[in-house]
Amino acid sequence: MSKLKVVSTIFLFTILLLASCKKDQIAIGNVDCNTVTYSSTIAPLLTTSCNTSGCHNAGSNKGDLTTYAKVSEYVNNGTFKKEVLTDQSMPTSGPLTSEQLGQVQCWLDSGAPNN
């Protein structure tokens, strides 16, 4: 087998392996949406999971998630839902629990109010 065929075969298998690797997603849990508010549920969640040093703290170049006004910018442009619920790529420190994902879903479904 020529070197080109060997390299091509290895490259093809590498691409197939990478394409088949997908992060296992956590199911969004069912929660009582009547208990979910920005101030008592979402803000504390952001503080412990996102607003850490080097991530989404005040003045961060990665995006500031320390105030409702800043968070609502990402909610309004769809980034928040995509990264937290759809892709589950945030937070990078580790996945949110099923219940936490459910809380975020409830808050977003209710229009992401500042309550």
Image (cartoon, grey):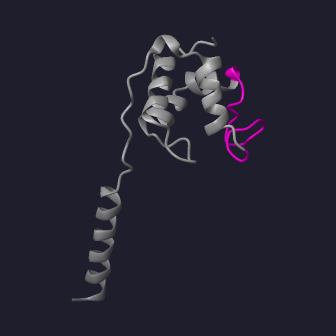
The percent coordinates of residue 54 (x first, y second) are: 71, 48
Position of the C terminus by quadrant: top right
**Residue at the right extreme of this rendering:** 59
**Is residue 67 shown in magenta?**
yes
The residue closer to the viewer here, 53 or 79, is 53
For the stretch drawn in magenta, the main secondary structure is: loop
**Residue at the left extreme of this rendering:** 1
Locate residue 86: give its quadrant. Answer: top left
Residue 3, compared with residue 71, is above or below; it is: below
Q: Is residue 73 left or right of residue 32?
A: right
Q: Residue at x 45, y 23 (%)?
A: 105
**Is residue 73 shown in magenta?**
no
The residue closer to the viewer here, 41 or 111, is 41
Q: Residue at x 28, y 70 (%)?
A: 13
Q: Residue at x 36, y 35 (%)?
A: 27
The percent coordinates of residue 99 (x first, y second) are: 45, 29
Residue 13, compared with residue 35, is above or below; it is: below
The percent coordinates of residue 10 (x first, y second) are: 30, 76
Residue 16, compared with residue 22, is above or below; it is: below
The residue closer to the viewer here, 17 or 42, is 42
The percent coordinates of residue 97 (x first, y second) are: 46, 36
| Tally of numbered discs | 0
Magenta extent: 53-69
Residue 25, compared with residue 98, is above or below; it is: below
Position of the N terminus by quadrant: bottom left
